Image (cartoon, rainbow, N blue to C red):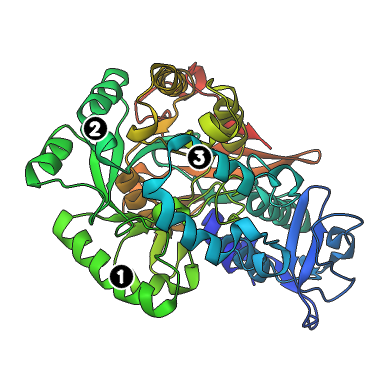
């Protein structure tokens, strides 16, 4: 039951002292683990609710400590899987006429004939109830992080306050990560890609371009070669973006075969579905290293739900890089905002948990000057964080490479020291978790004199980053 905890922190097994005492009830529902974390799963003690609101049972009060170990009234692995894989949605999702499968089919059939204004009006009607959704939390939900942090607090206490060593989340001591991605939806977006690359290059921001293989627009090898030659990445975006990729299992598996073909032809490691439609139970059919189709909190997306985490995680063999920031279309056309205020708020909440800030900006939706200004402001803000906070701004393929390497790393004791073993270990940082009163503190081990970003500095006189993070 400590699988997800150990995968998350990459700490030695001896420090994971939680266990689920006794059998769990068969019924799954919502309960709390501390004041903020709303979980979904089964309990050994207490009752669960079908809705994520009201007077929820707090399983924190049921924790029992004995002989240096802890007994919980729930299985954290079950809870984390239920959140990351959106299994809670079956019990909590509400469907209206406008969000039904039939309405979705009719919309995509009529879409080519509808004007932009009509499409925006229908989408606003469809999403009109988004403010009433209590779970996941909007705009950023960090329940997975909160559950793991709560377990870590308990483990530290159970071991008499002993510091817990773990492998830091990001390479070279970076405090957090950001990726910028561009989904190319139609001919105008395709034609704007060279200018968009100019903008990204001006800010020194690497980005990926997701291309629709069939029907939407044509492109040839020279188009892809230019993207790669300029240091950008190419991924596959759906098959034909008709909203029906997951309409049935048989249809999905047939389309997945063609999508995989295009992935090999493009030399693409990553995939993203159209409109972020998804069914994670079918992902074994996709032959990609990583996916970018799961929102953190999908209040403003056609398919509701969300994975409730700001960290990458594995879905079988595929690494999921969740979409953790509001899409540009939702910001500009559903919320009617053209500033970076919401994006900056989301970045702050994501980086508070040292997570991945993942952005989707469509070339199709920043053709207007005011929206392009907002995007440039975002790039300027990210560039400032890179300079001031040492934020790692990377290509999705680089994040995939690092997270896979980290998943194979281990902490081993060498005499009185802990050392990292595994691929890319030269980029890995040892960190320690401890308690400052009731606050969880992360501290990077600077015994090797490394600063975030990989440059050598005097660890006792570093103005770059103090290496201490308090949650």
Please identify the quadrant where the C terminus is shown.
top right
Q: Which residue is mark 3?
A: 118
Locate the N terminus and report the quarter of the image it occupies. Answer: bottom right
Q: Residue at x 37, y 58 (%)?
A: 242
- Tell me where residue 412 appears, x and y as whole percent: 46, 59
- Determine which of the numbered discs, if any, sits on residue 300 in the image: none
Residue 450 percent location from the top left of the image? 40, 30
The answer to which of marks 3 and 2 sits earlier in the sequence is 3
Mark 3 crowdedness (10 Å alpha carbons): few <14, some 14-19, many ≥20 = few
Determine which of the numbered discs, if any, sits on residue 193 in the image: 2
Would you place residue 117 above or below residue 337 in this image?
A: below
Q: Looking at the image, do the residues carrying marks 3 and 1 touch, with CB atoms under 8 Å apart?
A: no
Residue 142: % across, % down: 65, 47
Q: Toward the viewer: 195 or 315?
A: 195
Above or below 334: residue 145: below
Q: Earlier in the sequence, mark 2 or mark 1?
A: 2
Residue pointed to by mark 1: 255
Residue 413 can be seen in this image: no
Instruction: Give the class, few, some or many, for how many residues have Cα within 10 Å of label 1's Cα (few <14, many ≥20).
Output: many
């Amino acid at each position: 039951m400590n699988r997800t905890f150990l995968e998350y922190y990459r700490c030695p097994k001896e420090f994971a002292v939680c266990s689920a005492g006794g059998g769990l009830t068969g019924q799954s529902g919502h309960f709390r683990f501390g004041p903020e974390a709303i979980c979904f799963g089964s309990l050994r003690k207490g009752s669960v609710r079908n809705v994520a609101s009201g007077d929820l049972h707090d399983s924190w009060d049921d924790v029992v400590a004995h002989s240096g170990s802890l007994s919980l009234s729930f299985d954290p692995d079950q809870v984390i899987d239920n959140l990351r894989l959106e299994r809670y949605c079956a019990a909590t999702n509400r469907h209206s006429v406008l969000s039904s499968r039939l309405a979705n089919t009719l919309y995509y059939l009529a879409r080519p004939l509808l004007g932009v204004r009509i499409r925006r009006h229908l989408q606003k009607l469809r999403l009109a109830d988004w403010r009433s959704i209590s779970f996941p939390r909007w705009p950023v939900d960090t329940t997975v992080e909160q559950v793991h942090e709560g377990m870590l607090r308990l483990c530290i206490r159970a071991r008499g306050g002993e510091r817990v060593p773990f492998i830091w989340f990001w390479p070279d001591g970076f405090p957090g990560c950001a990726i910028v991605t561009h989904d190319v939806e139609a001919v105008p977006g395709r034609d704007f890609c060279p200018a968009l690359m100019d903008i990204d290059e001006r800010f020194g921001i690497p980005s990926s371009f997701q291309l629709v293989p069939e029907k939407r627009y044509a492109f040839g090898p020279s188009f892809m070669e230019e993207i790669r030659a300029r240091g950008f990445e190419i991924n596959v975006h759906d098959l034909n973006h008709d909203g029906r990729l997951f309409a049935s299992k048989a249809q999905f598996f047939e389309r997945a075969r063609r999508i995989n073909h295009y992935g090999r032809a493009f030399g693409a490691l990553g995939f993203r579905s159209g409109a972020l439609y998804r069914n994670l139970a079918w992902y074994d059919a996709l032959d990609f290293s990583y996916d970018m189709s799961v929102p953190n909190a999908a209040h403003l997306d056609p398919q509701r739900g969300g994975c409730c985490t700001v960290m990458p995680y594995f879905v079988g063999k595929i690494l999921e890089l969740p979409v953790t920031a509001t899409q540009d279309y939702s910001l500009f056309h559903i919320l009617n905002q053209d500033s970076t205020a919401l994006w900056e708020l989301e970045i702050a909440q994501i980086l508070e948990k040292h997570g991945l800030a993942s952005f989707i900006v469509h070339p199709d939706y920043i053709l207007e000057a005011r929206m392009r200004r907002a995007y440039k402001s975002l790039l300027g803000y990210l560039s400032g964080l890179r300079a001031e906070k040492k934020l790692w701004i990377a290509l999705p393929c680089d994040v995939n490479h690092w997270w896979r390497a980290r998943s194979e790393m281990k902490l081993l004791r060498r005499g009185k020291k802990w050392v990292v073993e595994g691929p890319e270990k030269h980029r890995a940082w040892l960190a320690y978790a401890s308690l400052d009163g009731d606050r969880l503190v992360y501290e990077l081990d600077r015994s090797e004199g490394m600063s975030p970003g990989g440059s050598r500095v005097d660890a006792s006189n570093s103005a770059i980053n103090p290496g201490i993070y308090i949650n």
